[in-house]
Image: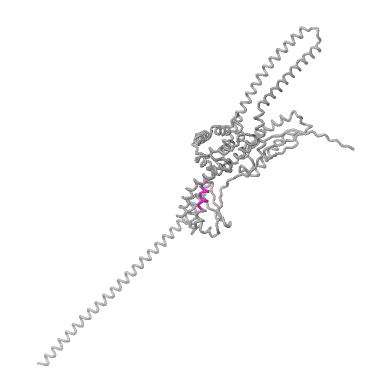
Amino acid sequence: MAFLADFLAEIVLFFAIFVFGCLFGWLFTTKIRQGKLANIQTEAEKITRTAHDEAKAFKKTALLEAREEWRKEREPLERSQEEAKRDLRSLETKLHEREQQLDRKVDVLESKERGQLKYEEELNEREQRIKTDEVSIELKIQEQNQGLEKLAAMSQADARKMIIAQQEDRAHQLAARKVREIKDQALANGNREAREIMVRSIGRFVSEVAVETTVSVVNLPSDDMKGRIIGRDGRNIRSFEMITGVEVIVDDTPGVVTLSAFDLMRREIAKNTLAKLIQDGRIHPGRIEEVYEKACADIEDLIREYGSKAAFDLGIHDFSEELLKLLGQLHFRTNYGQNLLAHSEEVGALAGMMAEELSLDVAMSRRAGLLHDIGKALPSEIGSDAMQTSINFLRKCGESPELIKTIKEQAQNMPTRSAIAILIDAANEISDHRPRARTERAEDYIRRLKVVEELALSFPGVINAYVLQTGREIRVLVDSEKVGDSYLDQLADELTEKIDNEAVQPGQLKISVVREIRAVHYAR
């Protein structure tokens, strides 16, 4: 019994150990499975994060590539659009110049028409006088015939001699009366003609011409600055051109870059902006826009400085601030390529010099000469009277009525204008129409002078013709054996009319016809 009890106890103990081992094995296996599952989940999360990061990087790369492709496609379109804008601006400039040419031609035609009407009126008056003289002569002839009838005893030859002698006396009396009228008219117009002749003689004054171009040059401290101006992938230069509206030309020329634009003020603002950026050293799109806004604010002071300097150079110190600013606006305007402020300052200086020679008011001449083109800086509306707008502005600025009247007489070319208005007109012609004042090619200038010489050589009896005084005078030499003294005035008149009708001659052209008589003998 004791043995059986021990055996059963061992069996129970073995069974208990077995059950405990199975339970421990199941718990250990479960723990291992849970650890592997946790590792698998961790690895899965890691793979998911890696895939998510790769997807983000791929998306960013694709976005950058798309932006780069968009930029490459946009650049040709922007360049073509900018070229089209430049072509359009050039066309607008040409149309504006053509319109100004047509306006001047219309003014010339109207002036010639007024002269033609005046000439026709004079011809009608002369015709009436001739008819009156013919009636008077007919009455005289009738009286003479009646007297001859009473003198029946006189022979026919004696009567003819008597009539011829009386007609000769009548002709001498008419000629003497005509000579006396011409002398009286010459004395009446002597002072005015003398002053105009003196003005034309002083018109040989020559100075440098201020011609504006469409480019400005900016100096660089070193060639490394060109790369900073261009920026990475051209970012800076594209931003600068877009903000300022001015083309930047960076070439192989050492130490400089070029700014190109037809608008002078826009180019001046861009030049100041680039100079400040170079001095500051920080060049990026945000800084470019900031400096550009500051340069736009500073341009008002620069305009006032230009006007003040022009007035100071001519010794004028009492201009109003508004007038000085408007005068400075002329620096950014051109007429046939010539800077309007430099042209106005030159007209004022020339008019003052000529007024001093003629003992006229020098200060008034300089002032009126400087302000004669001030209306071109005023904004004008379509259909408005530009001259009246200029007069109203000058009156508002406190200018004297005498100066306003002088400028109006010069602009409208009045026949009864004052001596100072004539001086300003002459100075304006000198500055405006001398060679190189207008942007004219040398070949065209030479061709125009040759046309004038060929017109003179086409007349019979002309030996040679030379254009002198840089295109302001033509000297015509005639054959003394073929042309008499009485034909000289007629030849000059015919040549004047032919040049006016067939040649393009800016300004006034003096025509001198010379007839020279030589006596040549030989001694043994």
Q: Is residue 183 magenta?
A: no
Can you give x and y, in whole percent of width and height, for residue 274 in the image? 51, 53
Q: Nearer the viewer, residue 97 or 190?
A: 190
Q: Nearer the viewer, residue 405 or 54?
A: 405
Secondary structure character of the magenta stretch overall: helix
Percent position of residue 109, x then y? 60, 32
Choose between 199 and 165: the one closer to the eye: 199
The residue positioned 71% from the left and 20% from the top of the image is: 177
Q: Taking 72 as reference, is 6 above or below it?
A: below
The x, y position of residue 463, in whole percent, is: 75, 36
Q: State whether residue 337 is above or below residue 137.
A: below
Q: Residue furthest right?
A: 524
The residue drawn where x is 20% and y is 81% is 22
Image quarter in which the N terminus is found: bottom left
Bounds of the magenta segment: 265-274
User: Looking at the image, which residue sits at the far left?
Assistant: 1
Q: Position of residue 49 (x, y in %)?
A: 34, 67
- In which quadrant is the C terminus drawn? top right
Q: Please say if 486 is above or below 292.
A: above
- Residue under the point 51% across and 58% down: 228
Q: Measuring 58% from the left and 57% from the top, which residue is drawn there?
A: 254
Q: Quadrant of residue 70?
A: bottom left
| Side of 87 where 58 appears, left or right | left
Answer left or right for 131 relative to 269: right
